Image (cartoon, rainbow, N blue to C red):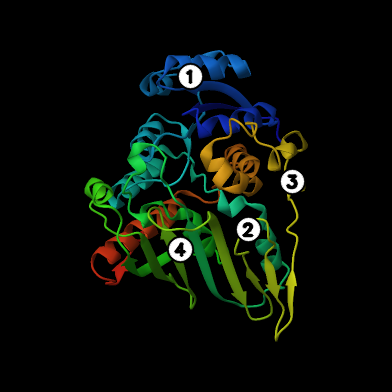
């Protein structure tokens, strides 16, 4: 393994603080700087982890020539503008989901990454969760057979979250259920038809003009003879949190458990089924960060809400950090790369557009052309 060190800067210290000790222990990272608008929060985290370089200004952070890589964990509406600015400043960019809120922003991210010749990766937790890694292993060993269909579901009541979430169109935050379906077949979405269902309260509708409680979409995958469906909701339905995906193969199928605490099921043909205990995949990581697949930064009292509801994000955080760091060190594209990242994001944007048109088919842009 190379001993090259990447100077990492983390922007946003709520959810973002989860990654600080991972970067501090990764053999190819130097946890160099943190950025937070609130000085009190900035100093609290900086003192806790012994980080000297601190910024309240994102613009000042980008002027620092020692920063190699920026990991963005800001509110959704800031993801694309900050990613584009960081790429233009010559930094590698990792950004929490979704990558953007519009097709135009997706195009600008691609253009900025291409011009800067820097890596961009949307830090999608699900495609590095232990459940996804288990299904990926079933695929790679041939146990699934031919993949015939996928289904994703992300059901989450967002009441009590920061105000910018209120009334958000469900599919605008759908990467957690879209991404695993595309990643397992190494594909990109081509077109979508989506139906909106139900109605949220009027005060929520007013913010984004989206009336739906649920949105359910069917996608066609570009240049493949397989499709998938996803369902997403954010408000006004009674359902325990779930972030799930199912994969149906000709030989074996994987179905996510219905409620927390149960185990997923393998369908082995005919009436034969088997409940499975999904293993951890810490062995795929450098030894110093393996502990973070089962342990987060926060204790039970102070855990970030996304970490609690997301079941610890399936142990994905160290895998995400490792993948992006090693893509830089090894001079290769990350997974997902910039094209996959914006396709996975744009899929949800186009799905909501379809729902607002009563299910009309909407074709996604081809960001590679």
Q: Which mark is residue 41?
A: 1
Q: Earlier in the sequence, mark 1 or mark 2?
A: 1
Work out how far the residue at label 1 is from the one at label 4, CA to CA, in angstroms.
Answer: 39 Å
Work out how far the residue at label 2 is from the one at label 4, CA to CA, in angstroms.
Answer: 17 Å
Work out how far the residue at label 1 is from the one at label 3, CA to CA, in angstroms.
Answer: 31 Å
Q: Secondary structure at mark 4?
A: loop
Q: Earlier in the sequence, mark 3 or mark 4?
A: 4
Q: Quadrant of residue 139?
A: bottom right
Location of the C terminus by quadrant is bottom left
**Side of 333 relative to 132 (left or right):** left
Residue 299 in percent (x, y) is at 65, 31
Work out how far the residue at label 3 is from the one at label 4, CA to CA, in angstroms.
Answer: 28 Å
Q: Quadrant of residue 17?
A: top right
Q: Earlier in the sequence, mark 3 or mark 2?
A: 2
Identify the residue position indicated by label 2 in the image.
132
Q: Residue at x 66, y 63 (%)?
A: 135
Q: Earlier in the sequence, mark 1 or mark 3?
A: 1
Question: Which residue is situated farthest in the bottom direction here?
Answer: 270
Residue 132 in percent (x, y) is at 63, 58
Residue 143 in percent (x, y) is at 72, 73
Q: Residue at x 52, y 39 (%)?
A: 305
Identify the residue position indicated by label 3 in the image.
282
């Amino acid at each position: 393994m190379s001993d090259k060190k990447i100077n990492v800067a983390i922007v946003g210290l709520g959810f973002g603080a989860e990654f600080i000790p991972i970067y501090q222990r990764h053999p190819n990272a130097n946890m160099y700087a943190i950025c937070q608008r609130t000085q009190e929060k900035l100093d609290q985290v900086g003192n806790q982890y012994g980080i000297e370089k601190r910024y309240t200004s994102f613009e000042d952070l980008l002027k620092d020539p020692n920063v190699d890589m920026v990991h963005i964990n800001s509110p959704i509406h800031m993801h694309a503008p900050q990613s584009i600015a960081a790429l233009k400043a010559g930094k590698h960019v990792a950004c929490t989901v979704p990558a953007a809120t519009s097709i135009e922003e997706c195009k600008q991210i691609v253009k900025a990454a291409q011009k800067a010749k820097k890596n961009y990766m949307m830090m999608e937790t699900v495609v590095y969760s232990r459940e996804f890694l288990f299904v990926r292993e079933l695929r790679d060993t041939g146990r699934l057979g031919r993949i015939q269909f996928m289904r994703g579901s992300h059901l989450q009541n967002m009441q009590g979250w920061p105000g910018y979430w209120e009334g958000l169109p469900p599919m605008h935050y759908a990467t957690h259920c879209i991404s695993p379906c595309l990643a397992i077949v190494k594909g990109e979405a081509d077109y979508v038809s989506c139906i909106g269902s139900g109605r949220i309260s009027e005060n929520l509708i007013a913010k984004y003009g989206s009336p739906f409680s649920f949105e359910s979409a069917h996608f066609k995958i570009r240049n493949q003879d397989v499709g998938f469906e996803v369902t997403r909701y954010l408000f006004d339905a009674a359902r325990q949190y779930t972030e799930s995906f199912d994969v149906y193969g000709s030989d074996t199928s994987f179905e996510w458990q219905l409620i927390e605490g149960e185990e997923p099921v393998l369908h082995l043909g005919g009436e034969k089924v088997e409940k499975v205990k999904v293993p951890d995949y810490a062995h795929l990581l450098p030894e110093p960060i393996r502990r973070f697949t089962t342990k987060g930064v926060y204790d039970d009292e102070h855990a970030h809400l996304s970490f609690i509801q997301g079941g610890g994000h399936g142990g994905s955080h160290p895998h995400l950090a490792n993948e992006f760091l090693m893509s830089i060190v090894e001079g290769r594209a990350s997974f997902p790369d910039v094209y996959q990242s914006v396709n996975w994001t744009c899929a949800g944007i186009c799905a909501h557009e379809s729902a607002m048109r009563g299910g009309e088919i909407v074709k996604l842009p081809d960001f590679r052309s």
